[in-house]
Image: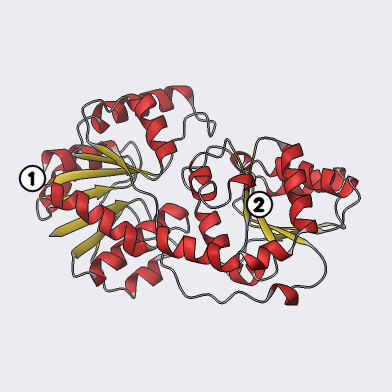
Amino acid sequence: MKILHCINSPHIGGIERLVIELAIEQKRQSIDVSIMLDTKKGQYFSYLLTQNIPILESGIKGGFDISLKTCKVLEKVFNNFEIIHLHSFSPIRSIAAKASKAKVVYTIHGLSKDVRKENFFKYALREAIKKKWLNKVNYFIANSESTLRKAKEHYGLKKTKNKAILNGISIKTITPTSFSDRGSEFTIGMVSRFTPRKRIDRLLNAFDLFLKNGLMGRLVLVGDGISFDDIKKQVEVMNLVHYVDLVGYTNKVNDYYEQFHICVQPSDNEGFGLVAVEAYLHGLPMLAFNDSGGLVEVVAPIEPDNVVKNIEQLAVRLSYYYHNRQFISENANGRIAYATKNFCIERMERDYLEIYQKL
């Protein structure tokens, strides 16, 4: 079976990392797999080169590239594969894939509707084309039941075969630092991009309420993004400078997980909850809001009380773990086992292989 995964670039991001790790596992399972990129520029490219997975270039020059020549070249390339697995939308790539002899699988990793501000006309045009095309793919996959439900509402998909396949990651054996070695200061962690959708303001307000209730602790925010300066200013305005660490971007995230007692992801409308899986692999509880989409599907099965409705409830859960730290360490192995069993890349590879074989 010959599979071709198509992504825009090897930039650092959840989708890119996921696709590359999936391709690596498929190769390990003796599947003939390749990856097509629109550009080789990106932090993951050197890592990808070391995997000995064939890399093709699409020749696509942007989201609205409509070159007929490029389309014909892509169609010819796609004819060499049995499955074209697309992970983002491009009109020219989509047309070429459907015109080829290959079966087309499309995975949606989240919806941009009501998530980020876009030019109305550009958005409307793209979504109209996308809706028409997605109803013609051979199989439509979403990374969570939440994403699948929203996709059906937005795109229809009444006659398109579809399924939710939860993401998986390459799981390395982790032996968490003993919780007794993490110091006496109660440390709340967040690992995230800094964007408006991550709703970091909700975490700051809950942490402020936690402190005003007479409790003590430190909030460590790991990550960077377009909202970093806004969050920094909010920390200053709320007089939390002495209680909040803004770490910025780091490639040593595991070092911070080893410092945390609990993790919080305050975002809404997440396509999936990879950050929760990472926290569980370190034995840590994850707190999330009930409007966080796919993140709820990761947190609720193991610790339903950690899914909160509002800022006040989040402050209560912070207080609970502050007073009951023994439950963090006592349940650590259960969290690790849960993440290892349900969110490993091997499980994800098997789920996709089943779809490929059906096609």
Amino acid type of the residue tagged 1 in the rendering: Lys
Q: Quadrant of the N terminus?
A: bottom left
SS at badge 2: strand
Residue at 46%, 43% (x, y): give it.
271
Which one is in front, 217 or 329? 329
Compared with 126, 246 (above or below) is below
Residue at 19%, 32% (x, y): give it.
136
Q: In this view, does 134 lie to the left or right of 238?
A: left
Mark whose residue sits in front, 1 or 2: 2
Compared with 16, 113 (above or below) is above
Would you name the residue on which mark 2 appears? 264
Which one is in front, 247 or 146? 146
Residue at 53%, 43% (x, y): give it.
296
The answer to whether residue 217 is visible is yes
Q: Position of residue 139 (x, y in %)?
A: 22, 40
Would you name the residue on which mark 1 appears? 101
Identify the mark at residue 267; answer none if there is no mark: none
